[in-house]
Amino acid sequence: MAVYQTTVSAPVNIACIKYWGKRDTKLILPTNSSLSVTLDQDHLRSTTTSRADPSFDKDRLWLNGKEESIEAGGRLSTCIVELKRLRAAVEAQNSAAPKLSTFPVYIASRNNFPTAAGLASSASGFAALVASLAALYELPATPSQLSVIARQGSGSACRSLFGGFVAWEMGSAPDGSDSLAIEVAPREHWPDIHALICVVSDDKKGTSSTSGMQRTVETSALLQHRIAQVVPARMDAIKDAILRRDFPAFARITMQDSNQFHAVALDTDPPIFYLNDVSRAIIAVITEYNRAAGAIKAAYTYDAGPNAVIYTPKENVKEIVELLLRYFPQSQPFPDPFGLDVNNEGKLP
Ligand code: PMV
């Protein structure tokens, strides 16, 4: 008997222009467009296996080996139902196609990094889930079309369906059909940019992005200024910087946008604090590094958690790792994270 099973992996993406706020919570339509870089290392990925079988009892999902419930009308179920609907359309066109849309699916997903710690695990997770079911169902859909479905799992997931530099255009259609991810430039356009991930804490975050965003939308006046006056111009400026490979412009906008996102979190009532003392110390180190160089050589950015991501051209990576190890001597680099022969004792050769 035929086995219908696929395994797909998807990487995390880290936003330079942050998505924070929903104008429609069910469809996950954002209050502003956003832009990110999809990381292409092996360290931060979700890998998802999907299997359809008529003998299965119902749709089921395991995350890191633990079964999660699939609530009717919830985000997981929305994505699965939508992908089965597209599969049913394929079957309607081709009577020889097996009726996979009628089979229950088992889905097993694993992250090779801490889940829900501000490392965008929901982004890679939902992107891998959607890509794996789309492959299982052999859907004739583009990454942008699939991004509309992944968006309904977790907003930022829509951007992980592309590699490289990716925009999530907020769109204006009430049904969300034009709120989707597009490629700004492929990774090869600017391979020199590297992302250094500094795991400050791998605890689960205190305020989830969903509840945090809702509170910000309801209470922050600064958010209204941000979405109307700031983000549209920043989106244009950062796309331009990427297309021109202008690192100082890219870096300045990235840091400004991270700072404004955390200012908006602080402007929320009650306030939300995602950064901790170590996060702020890393900001100070990078600021001083750029000041001493007389040029912007690195950019920090933080999502809904204390962990830093530092974007920098490859030539600076070794220097920055050394600098961070000097300030934070107890840190443990991932083994050989950038092909730099960083050994397990945290020393660079
Ligand atoms: O997609 P969510 O609900 O995990 O929200 C992600 C929000 C940020 O990571 C803080 C910003 C972003 O654009 O990724």
Image: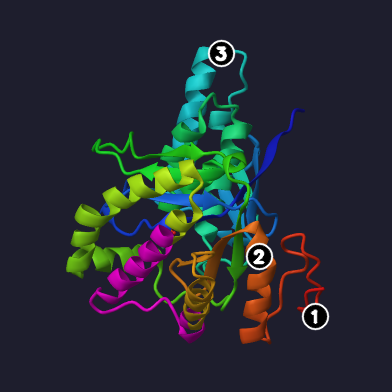
Residue type (three-letter) at the residue carrying disc 3: Asn
Q: What kind of colouring is applied to the model shown?
A: rainbow
Residue 69, visible in the rendered structure: no
What's the magenta region?
A: 252-280
Q: Tag 1's secondary structure?
A: loop
Residue projecting furthest to the front:
294
Q: Position of residue 48 (x, y in %)?
A: 64, 48
Residue 135 or 179: which is nearer the viewer?
179
Residue 172 vs 98, above or below: the answer is below
319 to the left or right of 291: right
Decide which of tag 3 and tag 2 comes sooner along the chain: 3
Q: How many other residues sit within 10 Å of disc 3, few (<14), some (14-19) or many (≥20)?
A: few
Q: Position of residue 117 (x, y in %)?
A: 53, 70
Q: Residue at x 62, y 40 (%)?
A: 188
Q: CA distance from mark 3 to mark 2?
A: 52 Å
Q: Position of residue 84 (x, y in %)?
A: 50, 33
Q: Residue at x 70, y 55 (%)?
A: 42
Residue type (three-letter) at the residue carrying disc 1: Glu
The residue that label 3 is drawn on is 94
Q: Tag 3's secondary structure?
A: loop
Decide which of tag 3 and tag 1 comes sooner along the chain: 3
> Quarter of the image holding residue 113?
bottom right
The residue that label 2 is drawn on is 317
Residue type (three-letter) at the residue carrying disc 2: Val
Viewer-nearest of discs 3 and 1: 1
Q: Tag 2's secondary structure?
A: helix
Q: Which mark is residue 224?
A: none
Residue 182 vs 115, above or below: the answer is above
Q: Which mark is residue 345?
A: 1
Q: CA distance from mark 1 to mark 2?
A: 18 Å
Q: Residue at x 54, y 64 (%)?
A: 297
